[in-house]
Image: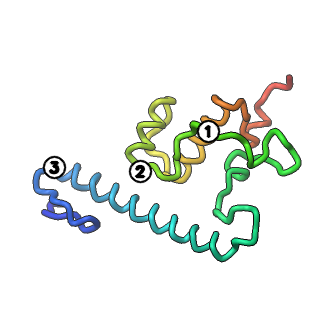
Amino acid sequence: MSTSTCMMCNGDLTELSSVDQVFHIDNCIDLKIETLLGEIDSLKNSSASNQTKSTYSHSEEEIVGASSSDEENSIDMDTTGMPNFEKMNKATLAEELDKFGLKKSLETHEAKQILTEIWLYVNKKKFPNSLRKYKKDE
């Protein structure tokens, strides 16, 4: 694949190798998809403004497996200082995954879920419900 401009951002690709061109275009596509998903979420939220619960397809409750009856796992958990994994591009997510020794090739959505669960466990001692069967009883 040899092209002179990026089909997404019209950036100049002449100085990049073929592999780097693919990575550049892949990153631009990821950014566009994330932007479109953000717009869709905004539309969903504005149409359901009278609801108190977020209309994201995967709320924090679903990601970390919190139950509404468990106060410790409530959606109102303090996430001060948590990086915004939802807005990270694929390259930044790969760097974050590498920090924990995880595969950099995870799907973007899966990587965001895993990084959120890791951050909540490391910083807030919130054990993911999806792994509860492996947790030793205290």
Residue matched to label 2: 89
Q: Secondary structure at mark 3?
A: loop
**Residue appearing at x 51%, y 69% in the figure:** 39
Which of the two labelled residues, at mark 1 and mark 3, occupies the earlier sequence position?
Answer: 3
Q: Position of residue 128 (x, y in %)?
A: 72, 39
Q: Position of residue 4 (x, y in %)?
A: 13, 63
Tell me the quarter of the image containing the C terminus: top right
Which of the two labelled residues, at mark 3 and mark 2, occupies the earlier sequence position?
Answer: 3
Q: Are marks 1 and 3 in contact (CB under 8 Å)?
A: no
Q: Secondary structure at mark 1?
A: loop
Which is closer to the viewer, label 1 or label 3? 1
Residue matched to label 1: 80
The type of residue carrying mark 1 is Thr
Vertical side of 102 occupied by 37: above or below: below
Residue matched to label 3: 17
Vertical side of 36 occupied by 1: above or below: above
Dividing the picture into quadrants, the one containing residue 133 is top right
Q: Secondary structure at mark 2?
A: loop
The type of residue carrying mark 3 is Ser
Tell me the quarter of the image containing the N terminus: bottom left
The type of residue carrying mark 2 is Asn
Mark 1 nearby-residue class (10 Å; few <14, some 14–19, many ≥20): few
Which is closer to the viewer, label 3 or label 2? 2
Please name whichever residue, 116 or 49, is drawn nearer the observer in this view of the structure.
49
Please name whichever residue, 106 or 100, is drawn nearer the observer in this view of the structure.
100
Find the distance from the CA under tag 2 to the CA under tag 1: 21 Å
Which of the two labelled residues, at mark 2 and mark 1, occupies the earlier sequence position?
Answer: 1
5 with respect to 129 (left or right): left
